[in-house]
Image (tube, helix red, strand yellow):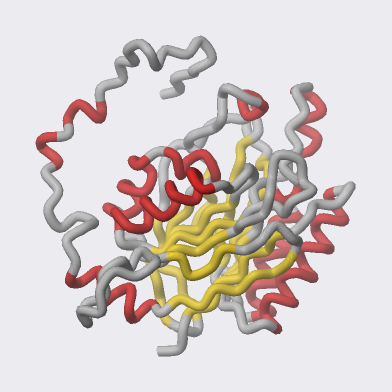
């Protein structure tokens, strides 16, 4: 099988939503010219990850999941025969959400995932958390792959990756907006390793406040079954510059590994993990700004 090509659209946002739309369209077309099967945007692309603390202004920046902004990428995916994961601030009640919608190459909407782990200690206290993680069968020219999503801070919780793995994810797409340094990159490496899935992350470039590029793809294949020994699971780590970065992923290798290695769900003992669902928070982890939303 030819390798699955994932385009990370490490783009600098523009001054207006309309400009972001046009720049996003152009980037997708360029990604297709570069051979991409999937194009992934950074976090909340329509707003350039700008979160005003005025609730009324915030609502004017949000777009419906059925808006022209989002549905443009539905039509573009079909036109280009390329899957597109478009991230945006979604209109929602009582507060907007941080959302990514995945369209397959036929323009079919596979899911709308809203960020579960909002950064309530920062500006994202103005956004409403999502309710669940989703996995769907993504049809590409290179095959059909079970694909899920996380958004930025979700990666810092092993539970996010575990749920996606248990739902069958082979590939996880991660829109992002933060400094990607050795520790956060290590989290991504860890999520890919422990769950034996591919994890692709797209960040804003250096020059966007509190961002530095370093979009990445990890395939999780640490010990190939051919006995060749440990290998680096990092297939791509971009620099800080704006650009479209293509990672080529050997999904046959990934699937062979998943069928033979000991990670993922092979030897878990979930009946030992009941404490994980206990909602009690003990010191030193008590935070006054934590919100529990059922």
Residue 51 shown left or right of residue 163 in the figure = right
Which residue does the image show at 62% across and 83% down from the upper left? 35
* 206 is higher (above) or lower (below) than 2: above
**Is 170 situated left or right of 249 in this image?**
left
Taking the view exactly as shown, the residue that stands out farthest to the bottom is: 1
Give how far across and how far down residue 43 sits, in percent: 64, 48
Check the image and report above or below for 157 versus 245.
above
Across and down, in percent, residue 151 comes to: 53, 46
Question: Which image quarter: residue 101?
Answer: bottom right
Answer whether residue 94 is visible to the viewer in this image: no
Q: Nearer the viewer, residue 8 or 221?
A: 221
Q: Residue at x 19, y 55 (%)?
A: 265
Up-down relation of residue 217 to residue 185 (above or below): below
Q: Say which quadrant the C terminus sits in.
A: top left
57 sits left or right of 250 in the view: right
- Compared to 3, does 231 lie above or below? above
Whether residue 63 appears in this view of the structure is: yes
Relative to 160, is 272 on the left or the right? left
Q: What residue do we see at 50% from left, 55% from top? A: 111
């Amino acid at each position: 099988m030819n390798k699955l090509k994932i385009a990370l659209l490490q783009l600098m946002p523009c001054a207006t939503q309309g400009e972001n739309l046009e720049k996003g369209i152009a980037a997708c077309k360029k990604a297709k010219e570069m051979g991409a099967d999937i194009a992934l945007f950074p976090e909340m692309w329509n707003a350039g990850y700008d979160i005003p603390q005025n609730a009324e202004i915030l609502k004017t920046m949000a777009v419906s999941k059925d808006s022209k902004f989002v549905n443009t990428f539905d039509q573009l995916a079909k036109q280009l025969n390329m899957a597109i994961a478009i991230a945006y601030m979604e209109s929602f009640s009582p507060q907007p959400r941080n959302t990514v919608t995945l369209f397959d190459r036929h323009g079919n909407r596979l899911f709308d995932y809203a960020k579960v782990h909002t950064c309530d200690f920062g500006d994202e206290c103005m956004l409403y958390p999502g309710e669940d993680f989703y996995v769907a069968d993504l049809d590409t020219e290179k095959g059909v792959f079970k694909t899920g999503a996380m958004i930025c801070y979700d990666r810092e919780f092993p539970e996010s990756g575990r749920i996606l793995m248990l739902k069958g994810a082979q590939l996880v797409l991660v829109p992002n907006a933060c400094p990607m340094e050795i520790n956060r990159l290590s989290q991504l490496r860890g999520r890919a390793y422990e769950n034996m899935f591919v994890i692709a992350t797209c960040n804003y470039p250096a020059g966007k406040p509190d961002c530095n590029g370093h979009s990445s793809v990890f395939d999780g294949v640490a010990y190939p079954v051919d006995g060749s020994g440990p290998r680096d699971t990092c297939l791509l780590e971009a620099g800080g510059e704006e650009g479209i970065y293509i990672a080529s992923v050997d999904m046959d290798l990934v699937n062979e590994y998943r069928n033979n290695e000991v990670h993922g769900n092979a030897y878990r003992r979930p009946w030992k993990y009941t404490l994980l669902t206990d909602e009690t928070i003990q010191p030193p982890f008590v935070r006054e700004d934590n919100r529990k939303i059922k």
